[in-house]
Image (cartoon, rainbow, N blue to C red):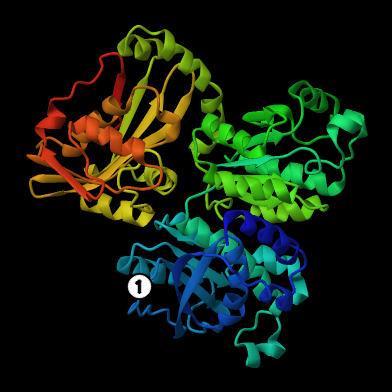
Amino acid sequence: MNAAHFALERAAWQPILFGTPNRAAIAGCIASWECRPVRVRVHRNHAFEPVSSICAAYAAWNRIDFDWRIDSYDDTLSFGLEERGEIELIWFDSERLQKVADGKLGEWLLERLRNLRSFTTNPIVALVWPLPLAERERITESALPATYVPDLQPLADQLAERWLDRRAMSISGTRLSNRACMEIARELACCWLPAAAIPPIKAVAVDLDGTLYSGVLSEDGPSGIEVGDGHIALHRRLGELRASGILLALVTRNERPDVEELFARRVDFPLRLDDFSVIEASWGDKSPALDRVALKLGISAEAIVFIDDNPGELSEVAASSGAVTVHAGVDGAETARALVHVSGIFRWRRSAEDELRDRDLRVSEQRSGLVRTAVSTDEYLRGLQVRLAYFIGGREHVARIAELASKTNQFNLSLRRLNEADIARRLVERPANVVAIRLEDRLSDSGIVGAVVGSRQGNTLRIEEVCISCRALGRRLEDNMLTHALRLFAGEQPPSRIAFDVSKGPRNEPARRWLAQYLNIELDEDAESVEMNFDVVRAKTISPAIQVEVAP
């Protein structure tokens, strides 16, 4: 099945998956398209099958196929690891645990999680219920890398007396009700597991007519369009996503002055025009408009969710751009539910960089103007007042470095997608194995935009991950930024050799081109590693126009 047909099928599934859940109807949603396999090892002490059977449809809607490797029941969580997965899932009913004293569940569970972490760097997702808030916070505050504990209590509160079904336990193998298992399956397949292992969505592009309101702006005018409760729910959900760091764009077949008048007059819209980082208002096809959005945001179209009420538009966009599509149905609230269940929308945590991203992008045109008028790179950098701060072995930046590794595509040399546990392990081996780079200039603070991760092997530095956020590209900084990082990585006793792990991906040509130019070599497409004398790094110069600081 091609992308256009998948978008149409995805739209047809949407009311089934995101209305009131019905096991028989959901089971009838069987994928006829290729999905990405993700192996999940399940450590459990009650039946997981009532959940895994429902996960399949939700996963397929997101083009994922979970390959479950389910262990036998084990109240001790001893973690037999004969088979490895990509994700470790703990499915645990703590009521079955009799030997742990009151108030000690969090301590016991944390000890078991640390034990599992000592065996693997895979992300760990622990679904434990009941788990008092104080006990859950104890685990969260431990900052165990790449370990996530969803809070099941809001679902339990929402379902109230429908959360448990002890009468069916002898048949189902769990005291959780059928409805509870379906609700958990939706969150697990669409949100919690993808957020642990799959690159995040970076932007949402939304249509106007029939999507954010009922009616057609060019025919009904600003006062004639109607905004129902469902549309308000969608507006508010989009606003929440923007606040969480996801960029918003407007892609509409309307005139720009009409769009501006609409938002000026309709003060009942929760969203305002300034909430959109990019506005594409034209009468052309949506896919070229979406490509322009991606270009302006400096991201791939595949990292964008596109919402439209017209299935034909969704089909055309999916076929031409690769964007993820969501159908804007009559019920805007259902559309909002579907949107937040697109894999990559949910995030386990919000980073400081999420708050900086929109401001950084809005001043990019000013930077481009400085590039065009400056007579030299040094003059440009001096005028921009560029400041680079380097953090060696900073544990406080592990989550951000993992985020960069997971979602950076254009400037990512190896595409290894190291997670927090991978990075934390390298820190333990040697603090200088992890260097984070912060970028500021007189226009904005970009936050942590780059990282170098690797290890020292004898007299060779092995660089396993080099990544720079797309927001930092195009500022003539890559050589300066990374040369200083590599020297800090080397430490006071520089090695004789440096080796870069490399990989060829669909969009990382800018990183490969940089490495070839930096080392003055021809980079073989099949190369998995490039090794050179470290003198090539020593010989590089760093512009005196850049202010450099090494954080303690």
Q: Quadrant of residue 110?
A: bottom left
Q: Is residue 459 left or right of residue 277?
A: left
378, 419: nearer the viewer: 378
Seen at 78% across and 36% down, the residue is: 270
**Looking at the figure, which quarter contains the N terminus?**
bottom right
Q: Residue furthest bottom?
A: 170
Q: Secondary structure at mark 1?
A: loop
**Looking at the figure, which quarter contains the C terminus?**
top left
Q: Quadrant of residue 203?
A: top right
Q: Quadrant of residue 380?
A: top left
Residue 14 at x, y = what percent? Answer: 71, 61
Q: Is residue 285 left or right of residue 221?
A: left
- Please give the count of numbered marks on the rendered protein: 1
Q: Is residue 149 above or below residue 462?
A: below
- Camera sees residue 341: no
Residue 235 at x, y = what percent? Answer: 75, 42
Seen at 39% across and 10% down, the residue is: 383
Seen at 40% across and 34% down, the residue is: 449
- Camera sees residue 542: yes
Q: Is residue 23 left or right of residue 354?
A: right
Q: Is residue 335 above or below residue 24?
A: above
3, 21: nearer the viewer: 3
* Amino acid type, label 1: Arg
The residue where tag 1 is placed is: 84
Seen at 54% across and 29% down, the residue is: 296
Residue 506 at x, y = what percent? Answer: 40, 46
Q: Is residue 355 above or below residue 73?
A: above
Tell me the crowding category of disc 1: few under 14, some 14 to 19, or many 20 or more residues within 10 angstroms, Cα based. Answer: some
Residue 28 at x, y = what percent? Answer: 69, 75
519, 132: nearer the viewer: 519
